[in-house]
Amino acid sequence: MRLIPVLSLLIALYAIGASQAVARAAEGASAREDGRSGKDGKAGAGKDTKDTKDTKDTKDTKDTKDSKDASADDGSKGGKDARADAGKDDKANAGKDAEAKPKSKPRSRARPKPPAPQALSAHDLAALAALQSSLAPAAAPPAAAPAIHKEVTWSYEGDSGPAAWAQLAPEFAACGSGHRQSPIDIRDGIHLELEDVAFDYRESAFKVIDTGHSIQANLAAGNSIRVMGRRYALVHFHFHRPSEEMVEGHQSEMVIHLVHKDSEGRLAVVAVLLEPGARQPEVQAVWNNLPLERNEEQPASVHIDPAHLLPENRRYYTYMGSLTTPPCTEGVLWIVMKQPITVSQEQIDLFSRLYPYNARPIQATSGRLIKEAQ
Ligand SMILES: [Zn+2]
């Protein structure tokens, strides 16, 4: 039969074609992963900064300048990363700050050797092309999926309220399964001679954003605290009403959370409790620059000094907890100032019109150590 050799030849040609297509597909995937691998970890934040710079260069020189200044002021790569992260969070919720960015995909270093060139007829090349294009969709990197930014809607009430946070997205799991969550009712602290938190705050440019969960002031770089041997840069502060943390069962009218990040991404939040009383100028400066639209940063024409948001008496409680908003990331150092500061009832009322209630319920302390300055 003459058919058999012809068939064998065809099968052989297709086999060559398929192996080449597979090899090329694998090469392509490998190259893409290599391209992505530079984005992992800190390099990722760096690239994001660059992307932002590139895209903004032409249309938004001020923002670009701000972010450059911030990076330069930080003076360290880590600080730059923190700033880049903070910038990213500006658009969403700073709570996400702590969340680990998607890490690099597994790298396939073993590249299949391309087969030796074969002399193929036009027909064979066409068949090969058809085979390759049929393989192409399968060879597309599944890695593209995590890069898509998805907004998960969460809130302080109803179906998307705190009790449901853990079920809203896999990355919110800690909100339900964590054992070191915040806020807590601060009581039974161990009285110690705690070192002072060294606040290095100064007059700073800021932008106000309504995140949909709170009003937040994003600060220019240059403010930091030093505590327990680490320096944390102040990234932003935001408000809750009522105060999320309780002190021996007492909940304050409001609270300011000053969110700090160190060069390795560790978070430290300083909580300043707010009670009704005298008007607070820094808070007023934030209110005065409220943006008209949600999730759009409003640059302020004035500066604020976050030091003025601190109480005179700097004694504090400290414990390890979590972000109080999804993804409820743990490992957050909490520093709750004992002495409240005051804001006017008018200032409280203004916030209440936007956010009548944005406090997560008290979480179990679960035997956590609470230290209290004597
Ligand atoms: Zn908060």
Image (cartoon, rainbow, N blue to C red):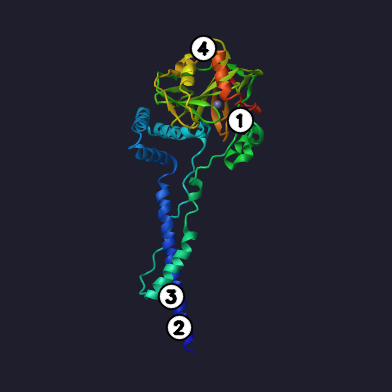
Dot 2 falls on a residue whose secondary structure is helix
Dot 1 falls on a residue whose secondary structure is loop
Q: Which residue is mark 1?
A: 181
Residue extending farthest to the bottom is: 1
Image location (x, y in percent) of residue 88: 45, 35
Q: Residues within 10 Å of mark 4 (few under 14, many from 20)?
A: some
Which one is in front in this view, the residue at disc 1 or the one at disc 2?
2
Residue at x 55%, y 14% (from the top left corner): 346
Between marks 1 and 4, how big is the CA–CA gap? 32 Å
Q: Is residue 316 visible?
A: no
Residue type at mark 4? Arg
Image location (x, y in percent) of residue 269: 52, 25
Relative to 101, say whether 94 is above or below. above
Which mark identifies residue 279? 4
Q: Which residue is mark 2?
A: 6
Which one is in front in this view, the residue at disc 1 or the one at disc 4?
4
**Earlier residue among tags 2 and 3:** 2
Which one is in front in this view, the residue at disc 3 or the one at disc 4?
4
Between marks 1 and 3, how big is the CA–CA gap? 62 Å
Q: Which residue is mark 3?
A: 13
Which one is in front in this view, the residue at disc 4 or the one at disc 2?
4
